[in-house]
Image (cartoon, coloured by chain):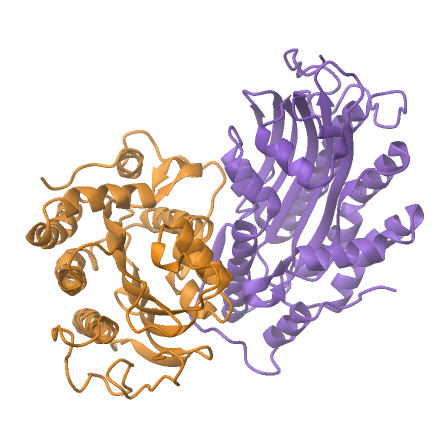
Chain colours: A orange, B purple
Amino acid sequence: DKFAKPFNPSSSSGLATEAKAATDNSNDIETPMRERMSTFVRKMQNKIVENLDKLEMQAAQELGVTPKLFVRDEWVRKEGGVGLSCVLQEGNVFEKAGVLVSVVHGPASANLIKQMRARKKEGVSDESGVYHMFAAGCSMVLHPHNPNAPTAHLNYRYFELVKEGEEKPVAAWFGGGCDLTPSYLFEEDAVQFHRVIKDVCDKHDTEYYPKFKKWCDEYFYIPHRHETRGVGGIFFDDLEHGDHNNLFKFVEECGLSFVDQYVPIMQRRWNAPFSAEMKRWQQLRRGRYVEFNLVYDRGTKFGLVTPGARIESIMCSLPLTARWEYMHEPAEGSKEAELIKVLQKPREWVV
Amino acid sequence: DKFAKPFNPSSSSGLATEAKAATDNSNDIETPMRERMSTFVRKMQNKIVENLDKLEMQAAQELGVTPKLFVRDEWVRKEGGVGLSCVLQEGNVFEKAGVLVSVVHGPASANLIKQMRARKKEGVSDESGVYHMFAAGCSMVLHPHNPNAPTAHLNYRYFELVKEGEEKPVAAWFGGGCDLTPSYLFEEDAVQFHRVIKDVCDKHDTEYYPKFKKWCDEYFYIPHRHETRGVGGIFFDDLEHGDHNNLFKFVEECGLSFVDQYVPIMQRRWNAPFSAEMKRWQQLRRGRYVEFNLVYDRGTKFGLVTPGARIESIMCSLPLTARWEYMHEPAEGSKEAELIKVLQKPREWVV
């Protein structure tokens, strides 16, 4: 049983302590998918962190201040697995930014198996079977200082369930997505973000983008506010049919394209002029972000009830600061009201 | 059917527009309980708002600034009922303070009846029965500016279920409580808050305080943080056995004693000196308050899934501002660490 042996963090399926993996096995179709994904999530994390560090350095230079870079924080899961959290707080561009990788494994809880049955994973239908899980993922939330600059979120993950005594997983699937949450609407930013990810989707399956864009709008809907969290992106789960090598290539390209989705937006927004009033509006929007994440987000809810879950990683998605005012309503015709309109009725950004 | 007729806001069971009810029927045992409670929650709201306004005026005078008083905001529930929200934002003493009354009635949803059956309300066991609900309550959350001054919460409520065609409720019960959430521990404040409410409890039943104090510590526990929200108070629900006149008197005295629990604390803390570091710690504690309210609080969760619930009232409990830092840990032996210790192991404040 592959999962029973102690996790070896220096193997290629783990997270090496050094900054880069010795060999990139993510494109080797002979390598087990869990190892390819472990390598890929690290690679994606590195690419994002490097590019955001660069943005911080560029900003520090322009402002004539000391750059503040990501801090790396490794952890070990007692029940099996390791993680690497890269977090930047109170930087020049970002108020709070977290790019987190985790590669965990171990016995699948009864609760998890029950959920998987509800999600029609037929491989776990044996009531007396003992199952092990493996999960590798990278998740990221970026909250910039500047109210003109949008918050971005990304998560790409791979999941396997293996029945004890068997080699081949009884279920294996990919999930993920990315979405943008501006405080002020700049159409060109929403178009940029969607355009890049649509191009990736279209290369793999022209049905992906329309389907996953809609799924994203639906997933990030806040019912009690009658609005979506942001201007969307893509969201998918249970991607398991067809050739897993192709699915992996799709997810890999999605993840590696994030820098192109987001960095050009930040380059035009991070230092744009803003008023105290605009900052206050951003803080109110951050409050809505907190509401979505704590009340509805499946990942957060799942994390909060999972024994041994790392609470600091789960809560890393929350903004550094947020605000709630009683009965706040943006003035008719204002920039703030314009954003709300889009959140109430999701738009098609690219066709 | 008493509940089918349109609600008359000028009747004594409603909330008159004028500041005080024409007649105080809360002590008339011949008056139906729902009317006595409607009158009482208004009376409690008035008493609290008046005393907090006084505190704000006193503070404004000391600071030589304009006082900022509570704003009153009446609303009508389409499905039946009315409310009066009194809110003060960015005052001199309070960052955000809400004292909300609602008196609502109407058909009981299938979801509510299901919940009531789970809570062993035997009067609603008739599967084919049609039920109506009545609820009168006052809830309050006060978030002061000064990190030395504690946040306070209170809620006292009365609930009735009536079967269609019947006069006498098939179930009727009281619930409520009060609790204190300091950012910095001042033992004398915790003792004061508990002492006043223990005295009220003891007058009615010496088993109340120990039982309700424990219930409060358990209810306000945040499992994912392994700590309670604050230093507690009392919490009770389903108070329905015995003489309802006595239960009413108990709840009434609890509610009317809040000013004595809290105002003396505020008088010594509202203007105590503090550092930027202390303010930041308070903001982090406010983050935990948000976590409890959005993830666990039964009232909030119930409100979020109730059709026609007033979202601005539900979210009024959230602080004006809150903060989340990754991996924040107070220094060993610091004032901040001292608070955490108490939250991890609730203490007996009065014996």
Q: Nearer the viewer, residue B213 or A209?
A: A209
Q: Position of residue B286 (x, y in %)?
A: 54, 58
Quarter of the figure with residue B316: top right
Q: Is residue B148 visible?
A: yes
Would you identify the image quadrant in which residue B340 lies?
A: bottom right
> Considering the image in quadrants, where does the C terminus of chain A appear?
top left
In the rendered image of this protein, does residue A5 appear above or below residue A105? below
Whole-percent x and y of residue A23?
A: 15, 84
Taking the view exactly as shown, the residue that stands out farthest to the left is A203
Q: Is residue B194 left or right of residue B45?
A: right
Is residue B193 visible in this depiction of the protein?
A: no
Q: Nearer the viewer, residue A22 or B229?
A: A22
- How many marks are shown on the rendered structure? 0
Up the image or down, A147 lies above or below A312; here it is: above
Q: What residue appears at the point 75 percent right and 62 percent down from the top-left corner? A: B190
Q: Residue at x 57, y 46 (%)?
A: B317
- Where residue B40 sits in the image (x, y, percent)? 78, 31
Q: Position of residue A312 (x, y in %)?
A: 44, 69
Report whether A212 appears left or right of A74: left
Quadrant including the N terminus of chain A:
bottom left
Q: Nearer the viewer, residue A30 or A307?
A: A30
Q: Is residue B6 left or right of residue B211?
A: left
